[in-house]
Amino acid sequence: MKIHVVRPGDTLWAISQSYQTAMNQIILANEMDNPNVLVVGQSLVIPETNREYIVQQGDNLWGIASRYGVSVQELAGYNNIADPSLIFVGQMLQMPFLSHTVRSGETLWAIAQRYGVSINQITEANSISNPSLIYPGSVLRIPAPPKLLIEVNSYITRMDETGRRNVLSRGHLFTYLAPFSYKMGEDGSLLNLQDTNVLQAANMTNTSPLLTITNEAEGTFSSDRAAAILRNPDVQDTLLSNILAKMKEKGYTGLNIDFEYVYPEDRENYNNFLRKAVGRLHPEGYTVSTALAPKQSAGQQGLLYEAHDYEAHGEIVDFVVIMTYEWGWSGGRPWAIAPISEVRKVLDYAVTAIPRDKILMGVPLYGRDWRIPWVQGTYARTVSPKGAVDLAAQQGVNIQFDTTYQSPFFRYTDADGQQHEVWFEDARSVQAKYNTVKEYGLRGVSFWTLGPAFPQNWPVLHNNFRVRKL
């Protein structure tokens, strides 16, 4: 897979020719509604012919496997497809093997170097007993180059049929799915969540669901609701009993705790609650994880940060989600949602307090449209990355890219004369984030939130990593 940034004068036909990729494959991969409309600065993912295939209407896995000379089992296994009948238009499949016809004078060493694999990988894939004996004209299966194995979580807020379809089509790329969220009563009760649809889809894609609890009350995170739980051991016992019962009833595999705006004086109470949760859930075979505010130092001030003890969470729970997004929040000034310069500052601190193999880095799947000049008290409109590109096309403006933040943006003036500034994510921005995961040696990533149309993210993710299934 390649990333192409549209230049002045580009056409889709010319782009397809330069990459020797069928136009239809590019259209499908990028979910292009009108292939004749390109925006200067727009990033496109380009499937690599022979290595990658974008599912089209009428395809089935058997037909695709036959075309590429692999078995259905090999193709399904390499792409984490639990049910071979479950593939979707626009889904990128990567081939576990390439075919190479040996030319006169070629050695196995030279072939291995060309494809970025080892000699042993080729000999094993082809049952070659003597690596020095290969013959011109023979066809070798070349294993795909190895990729880093990570874990991927995605939060989801839509529990309807649309949410179910989103999980079915993307679930092969998730380790965990976290339906958001179960609310708690002050007495330790759990308010029910209509999560049946998405849990069924998670099961069909071999994705492990995490029961997510929050201290939300009346539509917002409540410091008082957290305090009611964290300051009362009996309520905690009731809550954990209710959580265990719900996990067993619905098939959850772990607990994710997202307590935000916790009073600073409840910091140690929160840590003790985590210890109690682990003590109750681990013997039953469940994981415990938390969501943490993006801190850049241990002593960072503010209600969002102070009760989140990175060192304690890193010691107590199985893994953490660091919410490295919302710098460009709806009520604030226009800015990148997750500027990589700021994300790195958080990670620089986080890895000193939390084991790297316990950190899932947050990745946003959305953008925002602000009215400018920005006025205190006004709020930005949330847009999908695909919607942002469509908006730039409608307004006839070019997309720019901030190299410090590694994020695309553009400005436009609407029909009423109001100026706007839009920041969003694209293939380049998520590639920068995935490079950061590799550089820091993290456990993986966590998406907020599944739903907004961002077609480029999924092939970029798939191209960079193998996703662990439990």
Image (cartoon, rainbow, N blue to C red):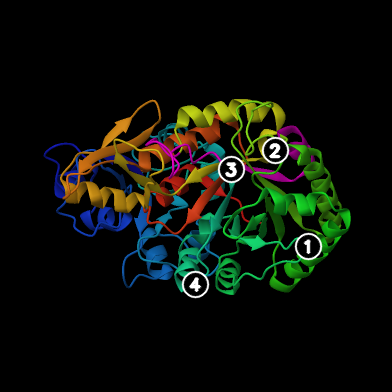
The residues tagged by marks 4 and 2 sit, at their Cα atoms, a distance apart of 33 Å
**What mark, if any, has residue 188 been given in the picture?**
1
| Residue hosting label 3 | 444
> Residue visible at 59% across and 30% down?
347
Q: At which x and y percent is residue 285? A: 80, 59
**Range of residues picked out in magenta:** 310-337
Q: At which x and y percent is residue 384? A: 36, 52
| Residue hosting label 4 | 160
Disc 1 crowd rating (10 Å Cα; few below 14, some 14-19, many 20+) is many
Residue type of the residue flagged with mark 1 = Gly
Residue type of the residue flagged with mark 2 = His
**Sooner in the amino-acid sequence: mark 4 or mark 1:** 4
**Sooner in the amino-acid sequence: mark 4 or mark 2:** 4
Q: Are marks 3 and 4 in contact (CB under 8 Å)?
A: no
Q: At which x and y percent is residue 323? A: 57, 42
| Element marked by disc 1 | loop
| Residue hosting label 2 | 308
Q: Is residue 188 visible?
A: yes
The residues tagged by marks 2 and 3 sit, at their Cα atoms, a distance apart of 20 Å
Residue type of the residue flagged with mark 3 = Gly
Magenta span: predominant SS is loop
- How many numbered discs sit on the rendered protein? 4
Please state which of the two labelled residues, at mark 4 or mark 2, is closer to the viewer. Answer: 2
Please state which of the two labelled residues, at mark 2 or mark 3, is closer to the viewer. Answer: 2
Q: Are marks 4 and 2 in contact (CB under 8 Å)?
A: no
